[in-house]
Amino acid sequence: MDLQDKVALVTGASGDIGSAIAKALAAEGCQVVVTYVGAAEAADATVDAISRAGGRAVKQQLDQRDPDAIEAAIDAVAQLHGRLDVLVNNAAWNIGIPFPQLEELTPEIWDRVLETNLRAPFLLARAASDLLKADGGGHIVNISSAGGISPGSSSIAYSSSKAGLNHLTRCLAVAMAPEVQVNCVAPGLVEETRMARRLPEQVAAGARAQAVLGKVGQAEDIAGQVLTFVRSTSISGQIMVVDGGMPGAMR
Ligand SMILES: NC(=O)c1ccc[n+]([C@@H]2O[C@H](COP(=O)([O-])OP(=O)(O)OC[C@H]3O[C@@H](n4cnc5c(N)ncnc54)[C@H](OP(=O)(O)O)[C@@H]3O)[C@@H](O)[C@H]2O)c1
């Protein structure tokens, strides 16, 4: 897809990776809608950086645990831009709970993780389906995690939510074809991110130690893979791991 003058919605673009994705799409000519839940200043920083670079972006508050708010957010995009070409389901929430500490993973934490990381990407895709299918079709790129492929990450709930997001990618690729291509980037540890700082230290150290390339990914590497997917015209239902080459995620 030629991204010039297309419209992209990047959820969680107040965060580290979402911000990099929003900037990369804007640099290609997309008008970008940047969502955040509480960090309005961080969302402003993303919008300002895009504007300073000559791009176009607006911020929009969205608590994606709320199904009505998701419908309203997509309606707002339709009102403002009249189209949507790219949906990047990047927003997520995590908390560090070592896998063996089963009692600490309460139903409330489980629901918060699954509602944010798995249910919301489905509801966003559903709400955006008509817009994405119009005008020659569009793309969804989900951001999951290498922890959704092999068991290991901030918590069992997070790992399970990302495994679900990987399979949701394949299901939506079938459901929304042929108009919409649906793909997924599965990052390993991404250095200098808020989410990485919430990982139990032994998990982060293990990722660094196992990366066969001697380094893990950066936010810009994830953004680059998003661009590769949205430029393609023949890839759908695929999950690309970006992690520095981790044997456990080589499937
Ligand atoms: N960082 C890593 O090492 C790593 C590794 C593997 C996968 N990933 C994945 O990469 C993506 C981005 O991660 P990141 O490191 O950039 O995380 P981050 O900096 O913590 O950003 C998370 C984003 O999600 C938003 N968010 C959280 N709860 C939300 C809710 N209920 N409704 C709407 N938005 C909500 C946050 O908004 P506010 O800023 O307003 O709170 C923020 O914009 C996530 O899907 C994550 O699972 C990251």
Image: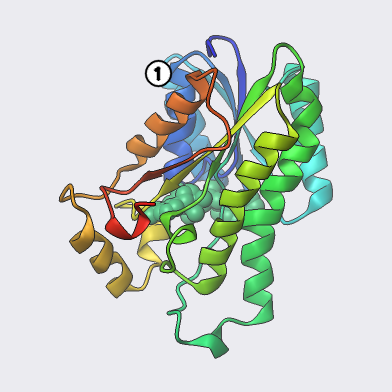
Residue sitting nearer the eye, 79 or 158: 158
Residue sitting nearer the eye, 126 or 164: 164
Picture quadrant of residue 74? top right
Residue 80 vs residue 93: left or right? right
Return the x and y of residue 212 as percentages of the image width and height. 18, 52
Q: Is residue 227 visible?
A: yes
Residue 175 vs residue 222: left or right? right
Q: Is mark 1 within 8 Å of ligand 1?
A: no
Q: How is the protein colored in the picture? A: rainbow
Which residue is pictured at 56% across the width and 54% down the height? 92
Picture quadrant of residue 30? top right
Residue 207 against residue 63 in the figure, above or below: below
Residue of label 1: 53
Return the x and y of residue 91 as percentages of the image width and height. 57, 48
Residue furthest to the bottom:
103
Return the x and y of residue 208 as percentages of the image width and height. 22, 59
Residue 84 against residue 75 in the figure, above or below: above
Residue sitting nearer the eye, 176 or 98: 176
Return the x and y of residue 29 as percentages of the image width and height. 50, 13
Which residue is pictured at 60% across the width and 15% down the height? 6
Q: Classify 10 Å Cα crowding around label 1: few (below 14), some (14-19), many (20 and above).
A: few
Which secondary structure, mark 1?
loop
Picture quadrant of residue 81? top right
Which residue is pictured at 70% across the width and 50% down the height? 120
Looking at the rendered image, the quarter that the N terminus falls into is: top right
Residue 58 against residue 213 in the figure, above or below: above
Identified by mark 1, the residue type is Ala
Residue 214 vs residue 86: left or right? left
> How many numbered tags mark residues here?
1
Residue sitting nearer the eye, 157 or 70: 157
Q: Is residue 85 visible?
A: no
Which residue is pictured at 50% across the width and 20% down the height? 232
